[in-house]
Image: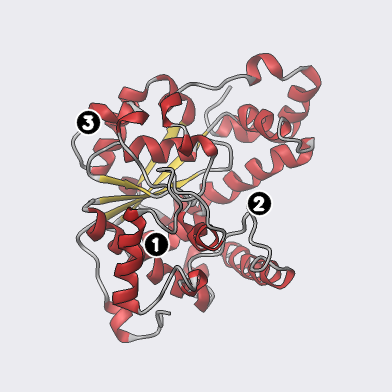
Amino acid sequence: MINPDSDLMSKKTYSDFRVVYICSAARSGSTLTDMFMGGHSQVASLGEINLINKAISLDANCSCGEKLRTCIHWKKIYDFIFNAQGINLINDPYKLRLWDALAFREVDHQRQTFAFRFAINLRKAWMKFRDSFPSNIRNSFPIPPILLSALYNKMNLYQSISRCWGKSIIVDSSKNVWEAVELHQRWPNIVKIVLLTRDGRGVYLSRRTSGRDQSESVNGWLKYYRRALPLLENYVSPESLLKIRYEDLASEPDKTARILCEFCNIPYEKQMVDLSSVTRHLVNGNDTRFFPGRGIKLDERWRTELKDAELDFFERIGGEMNQRLGYR
């Protein structure tokens, strides 16, 4: 485990790679965007990498189809980390502490206990408390040491992947806006952020069809952007923040690819538009990662499937935020 108070770590610099961190509410297309960028020859597409420990522990699949434990690409990372830090991720996957993340599908119940969730919720409460202050006061309150340590572990993981896979751009779709902001503030020349949005009515329908009730289907999306927008606008430099819409990516992938490449300062590559052109090695995320052959398709079923009562409910709760995000 990295000691965040060590002089060596506080002065450590990274210069041979850059990071694109995707922030979005769930069901907004973050996995698709991650895969889309991962089609570029210079880009490594990671998925929700904060859950890699859980995925290894449960012997989950890599998006390439192999088990994550035996995928030859990830084995290079395990060996690199073991040689550099003495951590055996196969035998002790949770030894590499990353930013807090709770699993909702494929839960490791031996790890994700009541005490584990309680500790995460305490740290969330502290982070919300920090955010209640103006920036000049907020920054005088440190983040919890376990999260600070996780930031350095994450940067070392990015570096390991960059070197082992020969990629200059690392895409992380873990979606945690607090982590994204803290990474950018410490490494502003390396970490850029993509804020991905999707019409809240589409998110609402997706969650409703998964069995969620009305309030739950809108409130997760709403709370995410209520937190994300002020944090990103106040603490991320404008040149390091790109806002894109799922609808634009799905309906105009070529145009969106050029925008993303310009943001990353890499040349545009046509193969990005064809999700099946490259084998990726994503960890966690939407099941889309296992089916690149399905391609990029715009999902706006909400236009025909959301009936008046459902639309009225969404508009009462989320209509204002939806308009703020640019949806009418």
- Look at label 1 and name its amino acid: Leu
At mark 1, the secondary structure is helix
Q: CA distance from mark 3 to mark 1?
A: 28 Å
**Mark 3 — residue?**
269
Residue 141 is at least partly visible in this image? no
**Mark 2 — residue?**
104
- Look at label 3 and name its amino acid: Glu
Residue 309, located in which quarter of the rendered image? top right
Answer few, some or many: residues within 10 Å of disc 2's Cα (few below 14, many 20 plus, some between 14 and 19).
Answer: few
Q: CA distance from mark 2 to mark 3?
A: 35 Å
At mark 2, the secondary structure is loop
Q: Nearer the viewer, residue 3 or 125?
A: 3
Q: Nearer the viewer, residue 16 or 96?
A: 96
Residue at coordinates 27% horizontally, 54% vertically from top-left? 18
Q: Does 163 sit left or right of 145 as displayed?
A: left
**Mark 1 — residue?**
183
**Of callouts 2 and 1, which one flags the residue occurring earlier in the amino acid sequence?**
2
